[in-house]
Image (cartoon, grey):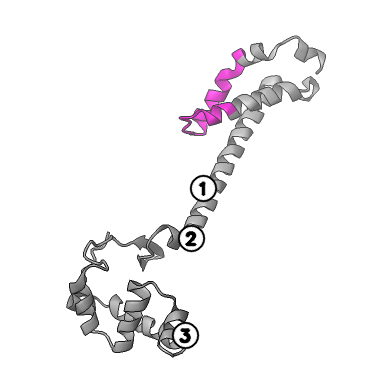
């Protein structure tokens, strides 16, 4: 610590410069309900106090520079964390949701849950069964209702995994059609 710093304590520097922290929080339009950014600014002020060298320029300029840039770095860090979290959610959404999405215009939106589409709704499943082939119904029964893997279904039905996948693909194709859903009584309201 050089001689000029010893003439001022940090408490004196703080009382004279605390408003700088608030100024940059407001200037950068930061919402700070938990005062995390205030703490960051306070740390920047202390760091500036510790590292200030008088021959490099005015102390207030150095305080302004460190406080402003420390807050900007914190904003960037939080934005990067949010982006990483959103990416993680997007990649792993099947684990967090039921996987029912409507695609369009470059976005995926979750479909509203329908109380009528449950394993206990015998009428819906009976209507669906009437409009599917035998193999397509096997896929619905085993894969959807009994939650069996494609491999297990293939072994049970003594067929290939590709055949079972094909049954599922045909069912999904049918279920995408509005007229088919109307025919079986499966109404999905867009949310």
Q: What element carries label 2?
A: loop
Quadrant of residue 2 within the rendered picture:
top right
Q: Which residue is drawn at 27% across and 78% down?
A: 177
Assess disc 1: are there few (<14), some (14-19) or many (≥20) residues with their C-alpha within 10 Å of its C-alpha.
few
Instruction: List x then y, in percent, for residue 90.
Output: 47, 59
Q: Residue at x 50, y 61 (%)?
A: 91
User: CA–CA distance between discs 3 and 1?
Assistant: 40 Å
Assess disc 3: are there few (<14), some (14-19) or many (≥20) residues with their C-alpha within 10 Å of its C-alpha.
some
User: CA–CA distance between discs 3 and 2?
Assistant: 25 Å
Instruction: List x then y, in percent, for residue 148.
Output: 41, 75
Q: Is tag 2's residue or tag 1's residue first in the polypeptide sequence? A: 1
Asked if one can make out residue 127 in the rendered structure from this viewpoint, the answer is yes
Question: Please, what is the dominant secondary structure of the magenta stretch?
Answer: helix
Q: Is tag 3's residue or tag 2's residue first in the polypeptide sequence? A: 2
Asked if one can make out residue 172 in the rendered structure from this viewpoint, the answer is no
Which mark, by number, is residue 92? Answer: 2
Q: In this view, does 36 lie to the left or right of 53?
A: left
Read off the magenta span. 15-39
Q: Is residue 169 left or right of residue 4?
A: left
Q: What element carries label 3?
A: helix
Q: Observer-nearest residue: 146 or 39?
A: 146
Which mark, by number, is residue 133? Answer: none
Which mark, by number, is residue 82? Answer: 1
Write down the residue under mark 3. Answer: 161
């Amino acid at each position: 610590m050089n001689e000029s710093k010893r003439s001022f304590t940090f408490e004196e520097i703080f009382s004279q410069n605390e408003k700088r922290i608030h100024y940059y929080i407001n200037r950068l339009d930061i919402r700070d309900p938990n005062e995390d950014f205030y703490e960051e600014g306070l740390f920047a002020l202390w760091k500036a106090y510790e590292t200030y060298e008088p021959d490099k320029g005015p102390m207030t300029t150095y305080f302004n520079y460190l406080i402003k840039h420390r807050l900007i770095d914190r904003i960037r860090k939080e934005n990067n964390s949010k982006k990483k979290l959103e990416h993680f959610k997007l990649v792993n959404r099947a684990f967090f949701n039921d996987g029912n999405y409507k695609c369009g215009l470059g976005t995926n939106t979750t479909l509203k849950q329908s109380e009528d589409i449950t394993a206990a709704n015998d009428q819906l499943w009976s209507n669906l069964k009437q409009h599917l082939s035998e193999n397509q119904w096997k896929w619905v029964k085993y894969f959807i209702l009994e939650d069996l893997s494609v491999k297990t279904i293939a072994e049970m039905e003594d067929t290939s995994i590709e055949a079972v996948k094909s049954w599922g693909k045909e069912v999904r194709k049918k279920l995408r059609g509005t007229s088919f859903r109307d025919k079986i009584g499966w109404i999905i309201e867009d949310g």
